[in-house]
Amino acid sequence: MQILIIGAGGVGSAAARIASRRSFFEKLTIADYDPARPQQLIEAIGDARYATAQVDASSEDSIVELIRSTGATHVLNAVDPRFVMPIFTACKTAGATYLDMAMSLSQRHPEQPFTRTHVKLGDEQFAAADHWERDGQLALVGIGVEPGLSNVLARYAADELFDDIEELSVRDGANLSVEGYEFAPSFSIWTTIEECLNPPVLYDKAKGGWYTTAPFSEPTVFEFPEGIGEVECVNVEHEEVTMMPRWLDAQRVDFKYGLGNEFIEVLKTLNKLGLDSTDPVSVRGVQVSPRDVVAACLPDPATLGPLMKGKTCAGVLVTGTLKDGSTGSRYLYHVADNEDTMARDNSQAVVWQTAVNPVIALELLANGTWSGAGVLGPEAFTAAPFLDLLAAAEPAGYGSPWGIVEK
Amino acid sequence: MQILIIGAGGVGSAAARIASRRSFFEKLTIADYDPARPQQLIEAIGDARYATAQVDASSEDSIVELIRSTGATHVLNAVDPRFVMPIFTACKTAGATYLDMAMSLSQRHPEQPFTRTHVKLGDEQFAAADHWERDGQLALVGIGVEPGLSNVLARYAADELFDDIEELSVRDGANLSVEGYEFAPSFSIWTTIEECLNPPVLYDKAKGGWYTTAPFSEPTVFEFPEGIGEVECVNVEHEEVTMMPRWLDAQRVDFKYGLGNEFIEVLKTLNKLGLDSTDPVSVRGVQVSPRDVVAACLPDPATLGPLMKGKTCAGVLVTGTLKDGSTGSRYLYHVADNEDTMARDNSQAVVWQTAVNPVIALELLANGTWSGAGVLGPEAFTAAPFLDLLAAAEPAGYGSPWGIVEK
């Protein structure tokens, strides 16, 4: 296997670090718009299988050329979701297997944005599914942590725990804090605004499938495991909701993000004041986008790892009829502790938890445990081998256990 | 009397409109940095006594020259508090009576900003008091609504209602809303941030006088009269606290601003994210001040009058021993209804309520009811004639009643 990672940001760099302890591939090229970034990274890693390249992720031709020149068989897209389509299409053209951690972007309904879907997350990619399948080529989409590990856990619940699933509710929460800052998001505020202020998508088979609501709808307090505790969660637009109903039989699917009350209030206030907008405003003769100003006022999340403390949890709350005939709920989850991920890979918890999953998927594809053709989510593959490899101690596995709690 | 108003913004313009119905002066010049603004205004008013001028309010020399060339005997400062000192000093030099509605700015304590005062509001002006008094010249400071009418009401309570005052608590609240906007402050957000995020100043005789607290301290819900209802109030830096103890005997003085819970949360969020800062940040190659960006995202309050609905209330809650020997509290207040002030003077309620008071004060100075020398607050003068003139129906008075409620 010849891997090409596009993007040497937090997640791409962490994936490269994690992969360097594995032997399933022969070569890994990491490419970025700024060639200095992957260069510094591979010097720090010191793995003879690693190479770097420069790429413009917005240019399909540039990516096709890069895939061909590096001989990449598998491409991991680790850049901003705005670049999903050029990379996805370039992989199809060049004949490479494609993996990503976020899918093509949505477009809100022009008249009823908070009731009806229009273009959903991933729709542009799923539209090409027949083409990929016919050519026997695989796009493994949404294989980060959420989407990604959450979809794997949902498939595990469907195969091993439940006979009949009433609801799949993906739930993400953390107790991370950043020393010395009153307010310092551990993830890009620009992207967080994007995903939180877009109309959340939900799925209800009885209501005819997918629909949308107003941002921050259906607030609920959920108790996350391993000492994280109670966090206020709200509906947020996320790929799992548009992915899971394609392969798993559930009455309802939603995604509830444990933003916590403080973060929710901050986002609502930014929206109320128009500070979430990307349309430029005129300020003393210069044009700026308010959302860029908000981002510029906050610390760069990439620099916060050493100052962070706490854990982040991703998982899925599954409700339905269990294998023993009883009805009940189980929360299947994975926790990353910032102290541990910083020590392992100099990567903060949220970033590390995203990056580990595509590396495991690549390993399963390399050894033939997973195979397929088309545009497939993680829930299209058997879950147990993935979860076993994630949990098994190093060097056999990735040494990062997952769990199940009764709810 | 020859009046010079410096500043043809909302308050200066409203004062000029209100004064045009009065006969106590011979000439009124309204000056602005932009000469088109007063020109449009006096064309709309059509009063033969009115003239316009251009002025740079930051230049003491330019103001001295303007006072001399217009023959002004009385100068009303109606610009931003940053220009208090040049206008105040120019009036001293030119021998004119000076009036303002906001006093010289404070400077926070370098080590203990939220415990101790350093340079208080008005300190720079009060430092010159001996000089004004010795020369028999009057600076009537803080004669808007707050400070201004609130100080007059406090003096009235001291003279007519109470034998002994325990506490003077100035309280300002409104139920104004702006049609078509989810969030639209009726007052400059730039100035509101300035006054709300500065350390609030309080006075307590038993604690040795003035001290400061953290912003938004001591939240309390106060029920405002005439249908406005309950509004959450917090301590805010305001001139009354630094003025009243100079002339009135009270154990404690504070200022609680009825910002309402929503506005308080907005201001706290702006502060938490650094969006209140006036220090420029770099955004994609340009430098902007975050606070300017916040202001640019919101509608211009000067344009909102026709869309506003509701009332604003200013007053003082006085607690102590009443003339009959009982102890109790009385709230002395004045309410302005936006519908009424728009109809009268095409001026929104908050602006009109500020502008009417210096006009009344000028009339009392013109007819000799009020006179004095030094740097004096409104509470240095007898209150009853002021309040009578405010309340009396037009044309005898200003037709804007005030009230007292037991609390």
Image (tube, coloured by chain):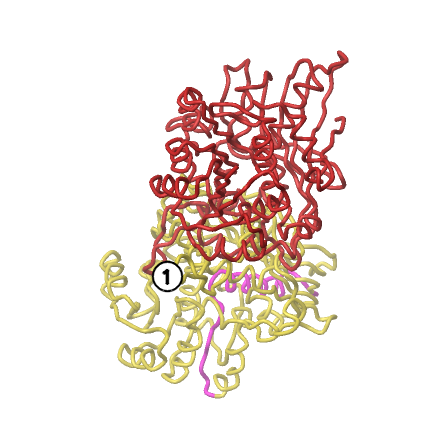
Chain colours: A red, B yellow
Q: What percent of the width, then of the height, locates residue B94?
A: 36, 83
B94 lies above or below A218: below
Residue nearest the viewer, comparing A358 with B5:
A358
Residue nearest the viewer, comparing B40 with A308:
A308
Q: In this rendering, does residue A188 appear at all? A: yes
Chain bearing tag 1 is B
Q: Is residue B162 on the magenta stretch?
A: yes
Left or right: where does residue A202 sit relative to residue B64?
right
Q: In this rendering, does residue B407 appear at all? A: no
* Residue in the image at 67% along x and 18% along y: A159
What span is colored magenta in the figure? B135-164
B124 lies above or below B21: below
- Determine whether the residue tagged by mark 1 lies in a helix, strand or loop: helix
What residue type is disc 1 on? Ala
Q: Is residue A241 on the magenta stretch?
A: no
A269 lies above or below A320: below
Q: What percent of the width, then of the height, locates residue B306?
A: 36, 45
Count of labels shown? 1
* Residue in the image at 53% along x and 49% along y: A50
Left or right: where does residue A252 sit relative to residue B390?
right
Q: What percent of the width, then of the height, locates residue B218?
A: 67, 56
Left or right: where does residue B179 sit relative to residue A342?
left
